[in-house]
Amino acid sequence: MKILVTGGKGTLANYMPDIFGKHTLYLYGKNSLDVTNMENIKEIVTKIQPDYIFHFAALTNVDYCEIHEDNAWQVNYKGTQDITIIAREFNIPLVYVSTAAV
């Protein structure tokens, strides 16, 4: 099974090898997958053809998000929306995890 993980450098993604170590993991951080860029998402999904997408990418620093509202909206809302659209388009199950702060 192939699993694409957004937020691949974050805390949650660090646990993926322990939990899904028998599967092929594609851990993509913000420097390799821009969740604010629909074409970038589509290109990576087309290349990998994952069986699942785990969407962990988010801006989680509340103070930063309050000051940089547009960036927070682009990543946390629009990025999640775009990941959802691509997952639906490719018929890939999506696992989304967030916190109360995001």
Image: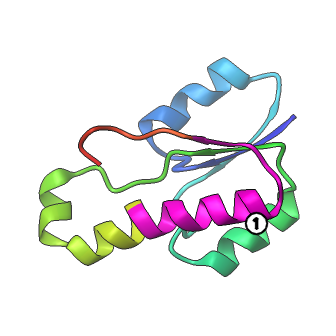
Instruction: Decide whether the magenta segment is chiefly helix, strand or loop.
Output: helix
Q: Quadrant of residue 87?
A: bottom right
The residue shown at (87%, 55%) is 49
The residue shown at (19%, 72%) is 68
- Residue 86 is situated, as x and y percent measured from the top left of the image, at 71, 65
Drawn side of residue 82 relative to residue 74, left or right: right
Magenta stretch, residue numbers: 77-95
The residue shown at (48%, 52%) is 57
Q: Nearer the viewer, residue 65 or 20?
A: 65
Q: Is residue 89 visible?
A: yes
Drawn side of residue 20 relative to residue 99, left or right: right
The local secondary structure at tag 1 comes to helix
Verify whether residue 98 appears in magenta. Answer: no
Q: Is residue 31 visible?
A: no
Query: Residue at label 1?
Result: 44
Q: Quadrant of residue 42?
A: bottom right
Quadrant containing the N terminus is top right
The residue shown at (67%, 75%) is 40
Q: Nearer the viewer, residue 40 or 89?
A: 89
Residue 44 position (above or below residue 61): below
- Residue 78 is situated, as x and y percent measured from the top left of the image, at 46, 70
- Residue 98 is situated, as x and y percent measured from the top left of the image, at 40, 41
Q: Nearer the viewer, residue 62 or 93?
A: 93
- The crowd level at tag 1 (other Cα within 10 Å; few <14, some 14-19, many 20+) is some
Residue 70 position (above or below residue 54): below
Amino acid type, callout 1: Ile
Q: Quadrant of residue 93?
A: top right
Image mark count:
1
